[in-house]
Image: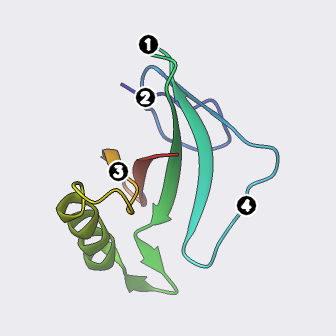
Amino acid sequence: MFQTLCRCDINMPDTTTQHHSDPMGKFAVVRKCMEKSTGHEYAAKFMRKRRKGQDCRVEIIHEIAVLELATASPRVVNLHQVYEMASEMVLVLEL
């Protein structure tokens, strides 16, 4: 599976992430990662489950559901894997 070697508290075996500076959007941080066993590169989208004191887990699950429904579309990135920790969720997406 996946492992991160960056400044975060996530343990995803078999993957490394690279970052120069943490590019942070309004809702997430996206980092490039590589699956060690295959060498495939992915984008890891780190999303906090709580923002400004509000639970955002439902919105994240909705995004996951939309990505799963759109797997047949060539215009939408494919969702490879999802990891959930205590304070954040990580969506591993194709580049």
Q: Residue at x 60, y 60 (%)?
A: 29
Q: Counting residues from the N terminus, which is met first, the one under dot 2 or under dot 3?
A: 2
Residue 2 has which mark? 2
Question: Crowding near pointer 2: few (<14 within 10 Å), some, many (20+)?
Answer: some
User: What's the distance in space between the residues labelled 1 and 4, CA to CA?
Assistant: 26 Å
Residue 37 has which mark? 1
Mark 4: amino acid: Pro
* Pointers 2 and 3 in contact (C-beta within 8 Å): no
Q: Is residue 13 above or below residue 67?
A: above
Mark 2: amino acid: Phe
Q: Position of residue 63 (x, y in %)?
A: 31, 70
Residue 81 has which mark? none
Q: Counting residues from the N terminus, which is met first, the one under dot 3 or under dot 4?
A: 4
* Left or right: residue 43 compared with residue 91: right
Mark 3: amino acid: Asn
Q: Residue at x 28, y 60 (%)?
A: 73
Q: Position of residue 35 (x, y in %)?
A: 48, 24
Location of mark 4 (residue): 23
Occupied quadrant, residue 80: top left
Residue at the right extreme of this rendering: 20
Assign a secondary structure to mark 3: loop
Q: Counting residues from the N terminus, which is met first, the one under dot 1 or under dot 4?
A: 4
Mark 1: amino acid: Ser
Q: Counting residues from the N terminus, which is met first, the one under dot 2 or under dot 4?
A: 2
Location of mark 3 (residue): 78
Question: Crowding near pointer 3: few (<14 within 10 Å), some, many (20+)?
Answer: some
Mark 1 or mark 2, whichever is nearer to me: 1
Assign a secondary structure to mark 4: loop
